[in-house]
Image (cartoon, helix red, strand yellow):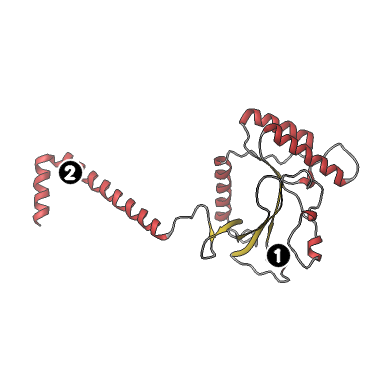
């Protein structure tokens, strides 16, 4: 378990291999040594021209630097507006992660609000949403394989819905998943039900069985000749 640190060498290698495969499959480029907003803009434009970038994710607003000096809220508002202009110029969606302050901890209603964002930037955003897990507010939080949670959309400039959307958090995969009719998480790579899986398994079994029999027949024909093969086949039928 990665949260407790109880993972062995085999688990580590598996995680590493999975991460590499995901990175290659999604054609991701991870840059973790650029923080200046001017440099971020420059690199984004170059990579869009070279690789036709489809999505930009910045983690997170609080570590983006700028030459501008003054009030923090004003500075981060300016950074957010620059990133918004960048996304429009490149015609690419841009997701900007931001930290939340601890004001909600002192409220009776712990659900996050737009005003809980630690820095500025809220005015520039087209959409703002928060993942929310009520179990984080428990005094003694117990480990659960699946936890009821929600995605709370507090701002949406596009025609869309505001409000709270129920989800299930699956700890083993660190995923927020949709919920099926039975209240269980729907894993995107595990949508097939048991009947569909068994049907596919049966189809593959008979397919490979047929291929195996065909190979055996070909080998017998090659070794014994066509006449001897049919004689052998008749003997088997009457046996």
Q: Nearer the viewer, mark 2 or mark 1?
A: 1
Residue 95 location, x and y as percent?
69, 44
Q: Secondary structure at mark 2?
A: helix
Q: Residues within 10 Å of mark 2 (few under 14, many from 20)?
A: some
Asked whether 76 or 81 is in front, the reply is: 81
The residue at 57%/57% (across/down) is: 178
Between 127 and 192, the residue placed more toward the observer is 127
Q: Looking at the picture, how far across and down is residue 74, in whole percent?
A: 86, 43
Check the picture and name the quadrant holding the N terminus. bottom right
Question: Residue placed at 76% from the left, 57% from the top?
Answer: 113
The answer to which quarter of the image holds residue 94 is top right
* N-term mark: 2 or 1: 1
Q: Is residue 203 left or right of residue 135?
A: left
Residue 173 sits in which quadrant?
bottom right
Circle number at residue 94: none
Residue 162 at x, y percent in the picture: 68, 54
Tally the marks: 2
Left or right: residue 144 compared with residue 67: left
Quadrant where the C terminus lies? bottom left
Residue highlighted by disc 2: 220
Q: Residue at x 70, y 65 (%)?
A: 136
Q: Is residue 203 left or right of residue 66?
A: left
Q: Residue furthest right?
A: 70
In terms of secondary structure, where does tag 1 sit? Answer: helix
In the image, taking residue 101 as reference, residue 191 lies left or right, namely left
User: Would you place residue 157 above or below residue 138 in this image?
Assistant: above
Which residue occupies 66% across, 52% down?
A: 161
Residues 163 and 90: in front is: 163
26 versus 148 height, above or below: above
Q: Which residue is mark 1?
A: 136
């Amino acid at each position: 378990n990665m949260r407790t640190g109880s993972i062995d060498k085999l688990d580590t290698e598996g995680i590493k291999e999975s991460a590499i495969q995901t990175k290659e499959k999604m054609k991701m480029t991870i840059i973790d040594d650029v923080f200046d907003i001017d440099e971020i803009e420059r690199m984004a434009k170059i990579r869009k021209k070279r690789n036709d970038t489809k999505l930009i994710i910045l983690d997170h607003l609080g570590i983006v630097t700028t030459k501008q000096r003054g009030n923090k809220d004003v500075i981060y508002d300016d950074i957010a507006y620059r990133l918004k202009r960048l996304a429009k110029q490149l015609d690419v969606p841009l997701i900007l992660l931001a930290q939340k302050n601890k004001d909600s901890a002192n409220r009776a209603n712990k659900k996050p609000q737009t005003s809980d964002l630690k820095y500025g930037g809220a005015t520039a955003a087209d959409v703002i949403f928060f993942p929310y897990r009520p179990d984080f507010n428990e005094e003694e939080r117990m480990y659960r394989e699946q936890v009821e949670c929600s995605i709370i959309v507090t701002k949406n400039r596009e025609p869309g819905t505001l409000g709270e959307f129920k989800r299930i958090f699956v700890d083993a995969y660190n995923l927020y998943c949709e919920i099926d009719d039975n209240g269980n998480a729907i894993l995107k790579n595990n949508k097939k039900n048991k009947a569909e899986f068994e049907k596919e398994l049966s189809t593959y079994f008979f397919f490979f069985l047929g291929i195996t029999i065909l190979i055996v027949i070909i080998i017998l024909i090659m070794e014994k000749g066509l006449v001897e093969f049919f004689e052998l086949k008749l003997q088997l039928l009457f046996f």
